[in-house]
Amino acid sequence: MAERVADPIIRLRGVTKTYGEGATAFQALKGVDLDITGGDFVAVMGPSGSGKSTTMNILGCLDVPTDGEFMFKDVHIETLDRDQRALVRRKYLGFVFQGFNLLSRTSALENVELPLLYRGEDKKTRHDMGMAALEKVGLDKWWDHTPAELSGGQQQRVAIARAIVTNPDVLLADEPTGNLDSERSVEIMKLLTQLNQESGITVLMVTHEPDMAAFANTIVHFKDGLVERIETGMRARVDA
Ligand SMILES: Nc1ncnc2c1ncn2[C@@H]1O[C@H](COP(=O)(O)OP(=O)(O)OP(=O)(O)O)[C@@H](O)[C@H]1O
Ligand SMILES: [Mg+2]
Protein backbone atom coordinates (compact mmCIF):
# COMPACT_ATOMS: atom_id res chain seq x y z
CA MET A 1 0.00 0.00 0.00
CA ALA A 2 1.37 3.41 -0.93
CA GLU A 3 2.31 5.57 2.02
CA ARG A 4 -0.08 8.45 2.45
CA VAL A 5 1.81 11.71 2.14
CA ALA A 6 -0.31 14.39 3.73
CA ASP A 7 -0.03 18.03 2.75
CA PRO A 8 0.62 20.18 5.78
CA ILE A 9 -2.51 21.93 7.05
CA ILE A 10 -0.27 24.69 8.44
CA ARG A 11 2.92 26.00 6.86
CA LEU A 12 5.07 28.81 8.27
CA ARG A 13 7.92 30.18 6.17
CA GLY A 14 10.40 32.72 7.47
CA VAL A 15 7.91 34.10 10.00
CA THR A 16 9.22 37.00 12.04
CA LYS A 17 7.46 39.03 14.70
CA THR A 18 8.75 42.31 16.05
CA TYR A 19 7.00 43.94 18.98
CA GLY A 20 7.36 47.71 19.40
CA GLU A 21 9.32 50.17 17.29
CA GLY A 22 12.66 51.93 17.23
CA ALA A 23 14.93 51.58 20.26
CA THR A 24 12.37 49.46 22.16
CA ALA A 25 11.67 47.08 19.26
CA PHE A 26 12.01 43.41 20.16
CA GLN A 27 12.14 40.56 17.68
CA ALA A 28 10.23 37.71 19.29
CA LEU A 29 10.30 35.46 16.19
CA LYS A 30 13.36 35.43 13.98
CA GLY A 31 12.30 33.41 10.94
CA VAL A 32 10.20 30.42 11.94
CA ASP A 33 9.75 27.59 9.42
CA LEU A 34 7.23 24.97 10.48
CA ASP A 35 4.93 22.42 8.84
CA ILE A 36 2.05 20.87 10.76
CA THR A 37 0.41 17.80 9.28
CA GLY A 38 -3.37 17.57 9.46
CA GLY A 39 -4.46 15.18 12.21
CA ASP A 40 -1.23 15.46 14.19
CA PHE A 41 -1.03 16.04 17.94
CA VAL A 42 1.82 18.50 18.44
CA ALA A 43 3.36 19.71 21.68
CA VAL A 44 5.22 23.03 21.56
CA MET A 45 7.95 23.38 24.16
CA GLY A 46 10.81 25.75 24.93
CA PRO A 47 12.07 28.23 27.51
CA SER A 48 10.00 31.17 28.68
CA GLY A 49 10.21 33.97 26.13
CA SER A 50 11.24 31.70 23.25
CA GLY A 51 8.21 32.70 21.14
CA LYS A 52 5.71 29.89 21.76
CA SER A 53 2.68 32.08 22.53
CA THR A 54 3.66 34.55 19.81
CA THR A 55 3.58 31.67 17.32
CA MET A 56 0.29 30.32 18.67
CA ASN A 57 -1.32 33.77 18.39
CA ILE A 58 -0.24 33.98 14.75
CA LEU A 59 -1.47 30.44 14.02
CA GLY A 60 -4.75 31.35 15.71
CA CYS A 61 -5.18 34.42 13.49
CA LEU A 62 -5.20 36.59 16.62
CA ASP A 63 -2.01 38.32 15.49
CA VAL A 64 -0.12 38.73 12.23
CA PRO A 65 3.52 38.09 11.36
CA THR A 66 5.75 41.11 10.78
CA ASP A 67 7.20 39.25 7.82
CA GLY A 68 7.06 35.81 6.24
CA GLU A 69 4.31 33.48 5.08
CA PHE A 70 1.56 31.70 6.99
CA MET A 71 -0.39 29.25 4.87
CA PHE A 72 -3.46 27.54 6.28
CA LYS A 73 -5.02 25.00 3.92
CA ASP A 74 -3.06 26.71 1.11
CA VAL A 75 -4.54 30.14 1.87
CA HIS A 76 -1.97 32.87 2.48
CA ILE A 77 -3.30 34.16 5.80
CA GLU A 78 -0.73 36.98 5.90
CA THR A 79 -2.50 38.58 2.92
CA LEU A 80 -5.92 38.65 4.61
CA ASP A 81 -7.43 41.63 6.41
CA ARG A 82 -8.74 41.51 9.97
CA ASP A 83 -12.32 40.53 9.02
CA GLN A 84 -11.16 37.78 6.70
CA ARG A 85 -8.87 36.42 9.41
CA ALA A 86 -11.79 36.43 11.86
CA LEU A 87 -13.79 34.29 9.43
CA VAL A 88 -10.93 31.78 9.18
CA ARG A 89 -10.72 31.75 12.96
CA ARG A 90 -14.45 31.14 13.45
CA LYS A 91 -14.69 28.47 10.79
CA TYR A 92 -11.56 26.42 11.29
CA LEU A 93 -9.91 27.15 14.64
CA GLY A 94 -10.59 26.58 18.32
CA PHE A 95 -8.66 28.02 21.26
CA VAL A 96 -7.97 27.05 24.80
CA PHE A 97 -5.99 29.28 27.15
CA GLN A 98 -4.28 28.64 30.45
CA GLY A 99 -6.80 30.76 32.37
CA PHE A 100 -9.99 29.10 30.95
CA ASN A 101 -11.49 32.56 30.11
CA LEU A 102 -15.10 31.58 30.83
CA LEU A 103 -17.88 34.12 31.48
CA SER A 104 -18.45 33.86 35.22
CA ARG A 105 -22.19 34.51 35.59
CA THR A 106 -23.03 32.27 32.69
CA SER A 107 -23.82 28.56 32.65
CA ALA A 108 -21.47 25.99 31.13
CA LEU A 109 -23.88 25.51 28.23
CA GLU A 110 -24.19 29.25 27.53
CA ASN A 111 -20.39 29.57 27.59
CA VAL A 112 -20.08 26.73 25.10
CA GLU A 113 -22.85 28.15 22.86
CA LEU A 114 -21.11 31.53 22.55
CA PRO A 115 -19.10 30.85 19.35
CA LEU A 116 -22.35 29.62 17.74
CA LEU A 117 -24.11 32.84 18.73
CA TYR A 118 -21.36 34.81 16.97
CA ARG A 119 -21.89 32.58 13.96
CA GLY A 120 -25.61 33.40 13.93
CA GLU A 121 -26.92 29.90 14.64
CA ASP A 122 -30.51 29.63 15.89
CA LYS A 123 -31.42 28.71 19.45
CA LYS A 124 -32.13 25.02 18.89
CA THR A 125 -28.94 24.49 16.87
CA ARG A 126 -26.93 26.27 19.57
CA HIS A 127 -28.49 24.11 22.26
CA ASP A 128 -28.00 20.83 20.41
CA MET A 129 -24.43 21.54 19.33
CA GLY A 130 -23.57 22.96 22.78
CA MET A 131 -24.87 19.86 24.55
CA ALA A 132 -23.04 17.59 22.08
CA ALA A 133 -19.77 19.41 22.81
CA LEU A 134 -20.35 19.19 26.57
CA GLU A 135 -21.02 15.47 26.16
CA LYS A 136 -17.70 15.05 24.34
CA VAL A 137 -15.87 16.49 27.35
CA GLY A 138 -18.00 14.48 29.79
CA LEU A 139 -19.85 17.44 31.29
CA ASP A 140 -23.34 17.25 29.78
CA LYS A 141 -24.83 16.69 33.23
CA TRP A 142 -23.22 19.93 34.42
CA TRP A 143 -24.65 22.11 31.67
CA ASP A 144 -26.43 24.56 34.00
CA HIS A 145 -23.54 25.14 36.42
CA THR A 146 -21.62 28.41 36.39
CA PRO A 147 -17.79 28.34 36.39
CA ALA A 148 -17.71 29.04 40.16
CA GLU A 149 -19.66 25.82 40.68
CA LEU A 150 -17.10 23.79 38.74
CA SER A 151 -13.57 22.61 39.59
CA GLY A 152 -10.55 23.92 37.68
CA GLY A 153 -10.37 20.75 35.60
CA GLN A 154 -14.07 20.96 34.81
CA GLN A 155 -13.75 24.64 33.86
CA GLN A 156 -10.97 23.77 31.43
CA ARG A 157 -13.16 21.02 29.97
CA VAL A 158 -15.94 23.59 29.44
CA ALA A 159 -13.36 25.82 27.72
CA ILE A 160 -12.38 22.89 25.50
CA ALA A 161 -16.06 22.22 24.71
CA ARG A 162 -16.41 25.89 23.72
CA ALA A 163 -13.33 25.55 21.50
CA ILE A 164 -14.61 22.44 19.68
CA VAL A 165 -18.32 23.30 19.46
CA THR A 166 -17.87 24.66 15.93
CA ASN A 167 -16.11 21.43 14.84
CA PRO A 168 -12.80 23.16 14.08
CA ASP A 169 -10.01 21.53 12.08
CA VAL A 170 -7.36 22.76 14.50
CA LEU A 171 -7.41 23.12 18.28
CA LEU A 172 -4.80 25.51 19.67
CA ALA A 173 -4.09 25.27 23.38
CA ASP A 174 -1.58 27.55 25.12
CA GLU A 175 -0.56 25.88 28.38
CA PRO A 176 -4.03 24.33 28.90
CA THR A 177 -2.88 22.56 32.08
CA GLY A 178 -0.80 25.43 33.45
CA ASN A 179 -3.30 26.10 36.25
CA LEU A 180 -4.12 22.49 37.06
CA ASP A 181 -2.63 19.84 39.35
CA SER A 182 -1.05 16.77 37.73
CA GLU A 183 -4.10 14.52 38.07
CA ARG A 184 -6.38 17.12 36.45
CA SER A 185 -3.71 17.78 33.82
CA VAL A 186 -3.61 14.12 32.80
CA GLU A 187 -7.42 14.14 32.44
CA ILE A 188 -7.16 17.12 30.08
CA MET A 189 -4.40 15.37 28.09
CA LYS A 190 -6.53 12.24 27.75
CA LEU A 191 -9.39 14.37 26.51
CA LEU A 192 -7.18 16.13 23.93
CA THR A 193 -5.83 12.73 22.81
CA GLN A 194 -9.38 11.42 22.45
CA LEU A 195 -10.49 14.46 20.42
CA ASN A 196 -7.41 14.08 18.23
CA GLN A 197 -7.88 10.36 17.64
CA GLU A 198 -11.68 10.12 17.47
CA SER A 199 -12.62 13.43 15.86
CA GLY A 200 -9.40 13.87 13.87
CA ILE A 201 -8.82 17.38 15.18
CA THR A 202 -5.26 18.62 14.70
CA VAL A 203 -4.04 19.60 18.17
CA LEU A 204 -1.27 22.10 18.91
CA MET A 205 -0.51 22.49 22.57
CA VAL A 206 2.09 24.57 24.39
CA THR A 207 3.40 23.00 27.55
CA HIS A 208 6.39 23.29 29.85
CA GLU A 209 5.86 19.79 31.22
CA PRO A 210 7.52 16.77 29.55
CA ASP A 211 4.85 14.51 31.10
CA MET A 212 2.18 16.40 29.14
CA ALA A 213 4.24 16.62 25.94
CA ALA A 214 4.54 12.83 26.11
CA PHE A 215 0.91 12.60 24.97
CA ALA A 216 1.79 14.19 21.62
CA ASN A 217 3.09 12.53 18.44
CA THR A 218 5.35 15.44 17.55
CA ILE A 219 7.28 17.85 19.77
CA VAL A 220 8.41 21.21 18.39
CA HIS A 221 11.15 22.81 20.49
CA PHE A 222 11.47 26.60 20.36
CA LYS A 223 14.57 28.54 21.36
CA ASP A 224 15.30 32.26 21.01
CA GLY A 225 12.49 32.93 18.52
CA LEU A 226 13.28 29.95 16.28
CA VAL A 227 12.34 26.30 15.95
CA GLU A 228 15.38 24.59 17.40
CA ARG A 229 14.43 20.98 16.72
CA ILE A 230 11.46 18.73 16.06
CA GLU A 231 10.86 15.23 17.42
CA THR A 232 8.42 13.27 15.26
CA GLY A 233 6.81 9.88 15.00
CA MET A 234 6.35 9.37 18.69
CA ARG A 235 3.54 7.13 19.78
CA ALA A 236 0.85 8.97 21.64
CA ARG A 237 0.57 7.97 25.24
CA VAL A 238 -2.95 6.69 25.80
CA ASP A 239 -2.56 4.48 28.83
CA ALA A 240 -1.43 7.04 31.39
N1 LIG B 1 2.72 42.27 23.21
C1 LIG B 1 4.06 42.23 23.39
N2 LIG B 1 4.80 43.35 23.38
C2 LIG B 1 6.14 43.33 23.54
N3 LIG B 1 6.84 42.19 23.71
C3 LIG B 1 6.17 41.03 23.73
C4 LIG B 1 4.74 40.98 23.58
N4 LIG B 1 4.36 39.70 23.64
C5 LIG B 1 5.49 38.99 23.83
N5 LIG B 1 6.57 39.77 23.88
C6 LIG B 1 7.97 39.34 24.05
O1 LIG B 1 8.27 38.42 23.03
C7 LIG B 1 9.04 37.32 23.56
C8 LIG B 1 8.33 36.02 23.28
O2 LIG B 1 7.15 36.00 24.06
P1 LIG B 1 6.16 34.76 24.08
O3 LIG B 1 4.99 35.16 24.89
O4 LIG B 1 5.92 34.30 22.69
O5 LIG B 1 7.05 33.67 24.85
P2 LIG B 1 6.65 32.22 25.35
O6 LIG B 1 7.59 31.27 24.70
O7 LIG B 1 5.20 31.98 25.16
O8 LIG B 1 7.01 32.28 26.90
P3 LIG B 1 6.27 31.67 28.21
O9 LIG B 1 6.74 30.25 28.28
O10 LIG B 1 6.77 32.49 29.33
O11 LIG B 1 4.79 31.79 28.00
C9 LIG B 1 9.24 37.62 25.03
O12 LIG B 1 10.52 38.19 25.21
C10 LIG B 1 8.15 38.61 25.36
O13 LIG B 1 8.55 39.50 26.38
MG1 LIG C 1 3.57 31.74 26.46
Image (cartoon, grey):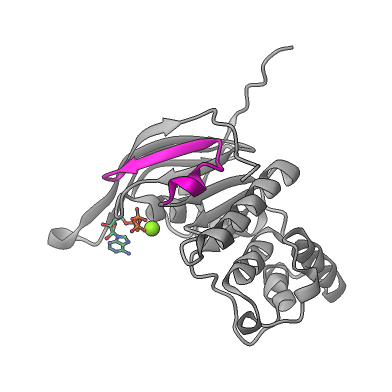
Answer above or below: position of 51 versus 36: below
**Residue in the picture at 60% in, 80% down:** 103
The residue closer to the viewer here, 183 or 7, is: 183
**Residue in the picture at 20% in, 58% down:** 25
**Image quarter of residue 153:** bottom right
Residue 231 visible, this angle: yes
Q: How many marks?
A: 0
The residue closer to the viewer here, 211 or 84, is: 211
**Residue in the picture at 43% in, 58% down:** 63
Answer above or below: position of 115 versus 174: below
Q: Quadrant of ligand 1?
A: bottom left
Which x, y percent locates residue 94?
Answer: 61, 57
Which x, y percent locates residue 12?
Answer: 44, 38
Left-right relation of 137 to 10: right
Per the image, is 215 magenta?
Answer: yes
Which x, y percent locates residue 112?
Answer: 70, 70
Q: State which quarter of the image contains the N terminus.
A: top right
Residue 83 visible, this angle: no
Per the image, is 103 magenta?
Answer: no
**Residue in the picture at 75% in, 44% down:** 198
Outermost residue, top side: 1
Answer above or below: position of 211 versus 89: above
**Image quarter of residue 116:** bottom right
Which x, y percent locates residue 212?
Answer: 51, 49
Outermost residue, left side: 23
The range drawn in magenta is: 209-226
